[in-house]
Image: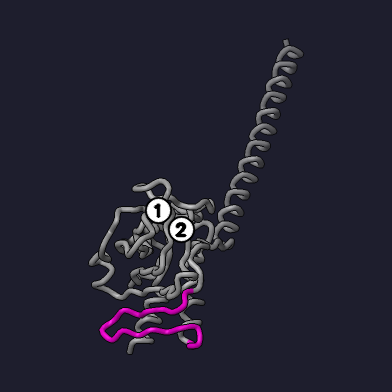
Amino acid sequence: MTEQMIETKTYAEQIALRRKKKIKVISIVAFALVFMIALTIILMACIKVDLRPSLIKDPDSIYFNSKTTVQYDETNEKYNKFLDEYDRSFNASFLTALFAGRLGGYDIEENHLTVLPEDVTNGNYVTFLYKNEEDYITLVTSDGKTYYSKYNSNYSIEFSQVTFALSEENKLQDTTLYLKYNWNTTNSGSGKDYYLELKLKANTYNLNELYKEFNK
């Protein structure tokens, strides 16, 4: 009777020991997973991504739309300062860009807008000008393919201006670039000017601060 109890107790102890070992292994694995997740989040917060649309090249000049309109070209220090800040306005951490819902690229909306929306013209806004026809930019999609108009599948779009509003809020947010182009599918005479919308993410707060500084 005593030997049977001892055997039973020993077996029970073995089961308890196995359970402890199993719990210990599970705890180590769980800790490792938590550590890896935390490390991944830290890295995602540190890694910077550039959301700037590559098709928007340096303009011939920058037009500051305010009560007193001012225009700068590449010979002016303010032109270079503004473009440097423009580049930085599309920089964000990988984590911020992920939660903002965009890791790069842009969406194109073509609705034959004839005028800029009031929410742009009622605030501070800027226009990039491409003065010469040879400097006009052919619109491409995020993956680099030529964009053809939804109104004419054989017609590609070349834009001569880029206009966008500047934000009073210091955060990455939805931003729209308005691309001005001339609709002329016949290539004879002068067509009609329209604005096409480029939807993306940007933080234009510092650009707005520069705008205020330049227009004092």
Q: What x and y, as percent, mark residue 168?
A: 33, 72
Q: What x and y, as percent, mark residue 198?
A: 39, 58
Q: Which residues are magenta?
A: 59-77
Picture mark count = 2
Q: Secondary structure at mark 1?
A: strand
Q: Position of 65 compared to 16: left or right?
A: left
Q: Position of 54 compared to 216: left or right?
A: right
Q: Position of 37 compared to 150: left or right?
A: right
Query: Do the CB atoms of the residues marked 1 and 2 lie less than 8 Å apart?
Result: yes
Most foreground residue, 106 or 151 = 151
Most foreground residue, 95 or 24 = 95
Which quadrant is the C terminus positioned in? bottom left
Q: What x and y, as percent, mark residue 92?
A: 50, 63
Q: Residue at x 41, y 68 (%)?
A: 160
Determine the image quadrant of residue 126.
bottom left
- Comes first in the chain, label 1 or label 2: 1
Residue at the extreme top of the image, as rendered: 1
Q: Residue at x 35, y 83 (%)?
A: 212
Badge 2 is on which residue? Answer: 139
Badge 1 is on which residue? Answer: 108
Q: Cα distance, mark 1 to mark 2?
A: 10 Å
Q: Amino acid at mark 1?
A: Ile
Report crowding for label 1: few under 14, some 14 to 19, many 20 or more residues within 10 A (C-alpha): some
| Residue 71 painted magenta | yes
Q: What x and y, as percent, mark residue 181?
A: 37, 63
Position above or below: 112 against 116: above
Q: Amino acid at mark 2?
A: Leu
Q: Residue at x 42, y 67 (%)?
A: 203
Q: Does residue 146 appear in the picture of this structure? A: yes
